[in-house]
């Protein structure tokens, strides 16, 4: 073999060796690695209600400085506000949330993700304790309470921020479904008058529908008829009455229920209510038509205030405390904040009784004691106020 051929073979061998070394170095030292938090990477998990979820479903991918792909658990629950809020609801155009931000003293508007919160009122509202929104969300009854516990109420127009004072004896105010009238209990401690009345939102053009000796009745106007009930307690029975604003006929629709709190469907054709034993124990949820018919137990232990109806009334969404057994008297302990819940969130089919844990096996870092639940118009978000910190949260459904 001549010298030239030997040199050529040597060069080829050297090139091959260098290429092989380079490939080995890349594969073992330089090639990006995939890190997964799923220890059972070869198994699929079954979703509640059917179907499967792949290995990386419910996680989001991020890249670190080493160009490594890291899978992190994507939480479906999110804080909409960074501070305590009051009376959140869906805006009049159904595209945003509106709420009163306690620290700022203003009404804010936010998208459903909480990324675009903007003050929509200029007037600072001091000592505001509650907002009773009209169904159209263009106006509201504002309830104030000063340091001396004096209560005052105003009709408030959201568009121009104009307000009108309402009479001091108007209590338990509720809006009609068309937002054109209010119903209330008129209690005059001086004269002893105790009437259920309806009026224009500013209190004018009032008419008495019912004179009664019962005081402190909760007044609700979810549909055509007005509904009255005693304040709920696990130590006392309550009744639900239907009152026609035209014929003035009064009928008892649900009778003698301990721990009786109520959540109406959007159209007012159905209600869900909580019921307890005579000592405020063994709380459960029931549903019924607005005339009291078709009563049905749902089989969950929670309060009506922790639930909301879907628009088609096929489902209810409920926050169910895992620690409900710690409560001594419900709903009393919940109202007095003697009982703080640690909730899980469920979607319940009222027809079949199927219960789906909305968050599945997601590991919640924060504990939630939910109240004031409501859904987005498309029912793709569930909103609630966490009693533990007063902030507004959302769950992506």
Image (cartoon, helix red, strand yellow):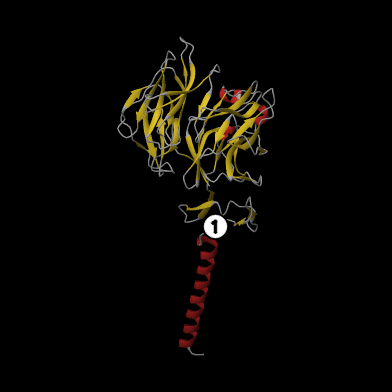
Residue displayed at 33% across by 32% down: 121
- Residue 290: quadrant of the picture: top right
Q: Answer above or below: position of 198 versus 112.
A: above
Q: Is residue 368 visible?
A: no
In screen coordinates, is 325 left or right of 96? Answer: right
Q: Secondary structure at mark 1?
A: strand
**Residue extending furthest toward the top:** 190
Q: In the image, residue 151 lies at what x, y percent?
A: 42, 17
Q: Is residue 284 visible?
A: yes
Q: In the image, residue 276 lies at what x, y percent?
A: 67, 28
**Residue extending furthest toward the bottom:** 1
User: Depth check: 96 or 222 in front?
Assistant: 222
Q: Answer above or below: position of 150 versus 87.
A: above
- Residue 125: quadrant of the picture: top left
User: Depth check: 156 or 63 in front?
Assistant: 156
Q: In the image, residue 11 lies at what x, y percent?
A: 47, 79
In screen coordinates, is 273 left or right of 372? Answer: right
Report how many numbered discs are placed on residues in the image: 1
Q: Answer above or below: position of 41 versus 328.
A: below
Q: Which residue is mark 1?
A: 34
User: Depth check: 75 or 354 in front?
Assistant: 354
In screen coordinates, is 263 left or right of 329? Answer: left
Q: In the image, residue 335 lies at what x, y percent?
A: 56, 24
Q: Residues within 10 Å of mark 1 (few under 14, many from 20)?
A: few
């Amino acid at each position: 073999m001549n010298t030239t051929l030997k040199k050529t073979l040597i060069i080829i061998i050297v090139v091959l060796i260098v290429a092989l070394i380079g490939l080995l170095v890349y594969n073992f030292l330089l090639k990006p690695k995939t890190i997964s938090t799923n220890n059972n990477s070869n198994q699929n998990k079954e979703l509640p209600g059917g179907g499967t979820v792949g290995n990386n479903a419910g996680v989001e991918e991020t890249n670190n400085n080493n160009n490594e792909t890291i899978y992190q658990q994507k939480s479906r629950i999110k804080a909409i506000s960074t501070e305590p809020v009051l009376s959140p609801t869906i805006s009049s155009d159904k595209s945003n949330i509106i709420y009163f931000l306690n620290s700022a003293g203003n009404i804010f508007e936010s998208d459903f993700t909480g990324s675009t919160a903007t003050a929509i009122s200029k007037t600072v509202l001091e000592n505001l304790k509650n907002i009773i929104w009209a169904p159209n969300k263009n106006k509201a009854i504002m309830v104030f309470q000063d340091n001396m516990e004096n209560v005052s109420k105003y009709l408030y127009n959201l568009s121009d921020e104009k307000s009108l004072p309402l009479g001091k004896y108007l209590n338990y105010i509720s809006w009609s479904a068309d937002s054109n009238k209010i119903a209330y209990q008129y209690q005059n401690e001086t004269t002893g008058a105790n009437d259920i009345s309806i009026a224009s939102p500013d209190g004018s053009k009032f008419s008495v529908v019912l004179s009664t000796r019962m005081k402190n009745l909760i007044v609700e106007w979810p549909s055509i008829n007005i509904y009255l009930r005693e304040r709920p307690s696990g130590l006392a029975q309550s009744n639900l009455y239907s009152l026609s604003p035209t014929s003035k006929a009064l009928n008892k629709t649900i009778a003698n229920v301990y721990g009786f709190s109520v959540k109406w469907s959007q159209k007012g054709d159905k209600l869900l209510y909580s019921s307890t034993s005579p000592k405020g124990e063994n709380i459960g949820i029931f549903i019924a038509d607005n005339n009291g018919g078709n009563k049905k137990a749902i089989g969950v232990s929670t309060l009506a205030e922790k639930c909301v109806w879907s628009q088609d009334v096929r489902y209810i969404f409920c926050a169910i405390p895992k620690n409900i057994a710690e409560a001594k008297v419900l709903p009393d302990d919940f109202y007095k904040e003697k009982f703080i819940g640690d909730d899980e969130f469920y979607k319940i089919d009222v027809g079949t009784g199927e219960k789906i844990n909305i968050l599945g096996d997601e590991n919640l870092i924060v504990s939630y004691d939910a109240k004031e639940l409501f859904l987005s118009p498309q029912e793709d978000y569930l909103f609630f106020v966490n009693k533990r910190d007063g902030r507004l949260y959302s769950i992506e459904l």
